[in-house]
Image (cartoon, helix red, strand yellow):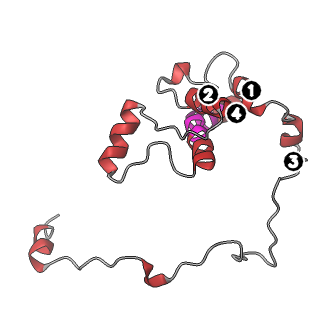
Amino acid sequence: MFFYFIYLNILIPRLNQIGILIYEMLAGYPPFFDDNPFGIYEKILAGKIDWPRHMDPIAKDLVKKLLVQDRTKRLGNMKNGADDVKRHRWFKGLDWDEVFYRKLKPPIVPKVSYDGDTCNFDEYPEADWQRTPCVTEKDYKLFESF
């Protein structure tokens, strides 16, 4: 019973997040990208995704099935559960027992010298971000009783 609870409350709602993560890792940007936050919201509601030309059709198929808005039709939420995801063509050749027992060799092992080593990350100057002006006294007063 406990594992069923874990499955229902952790894995199922996260399947669409796995689809978003796969898309972002392959495309380099999120599937519902827009410069305007409301535009992102509209794209999510419409399920509108701009697919990059270079995306593998099998990966695209997996992401599409993980991002189906109707949870009852989403890959991984049907009769066979997560096994449907594991059987998808994109995972062909993956030994799930090796995944479970952490025996898979990662394709890239970054060299680190110590815990917290950030040498593999680009450096960005602190002054790169844009400062916004402080709230004016007039605007501040609007929220006094809030």
Q: Residues within 10 Å of mark 3 (few under 14, many from 20)?
A: few
Q: Residue at x 57, y 52 (%)?
A: 28
Q: Nearer the viewer, mark 3 or mark 4?
A: 3
**Amino acid type assigned to the residue bearing label 3 in the image:** Arg
Q: Which residue is mark 1?
A: 89
Marking on residue 102: 3
Q: Which residue is mark 4?
A: 2
Q: Position of residue 75 (x, y in %)?
A: 62, 24
Dot placed on the residue nearer the N-terminal end, 4 or 1: 4
Q: CA distance from mark 2 to mark 4?
A: 32 Å
Residue range highlighted in magenta: 7-19
Q: Is residue 98 above or below residue 92?
A: below
Figure quadrant of the C terminus: bottom left
Q: CA distance from mark 4 to mark 1?
A: 30 Å
Where disc 1 sits, the SS reads helix
- Report if the CB atoms under discs 1 and 2 are less than 8 Å apart: yes
Dot placed on the residue nearer the N-terminal end, 3 or 1: 1
Q: Which residue is mark 2?
A: 61
Is 120 situated left or right of 73 in this image?
A: right
Dot placed on the residue nearer the N-terminal end, 1 or 2: 2
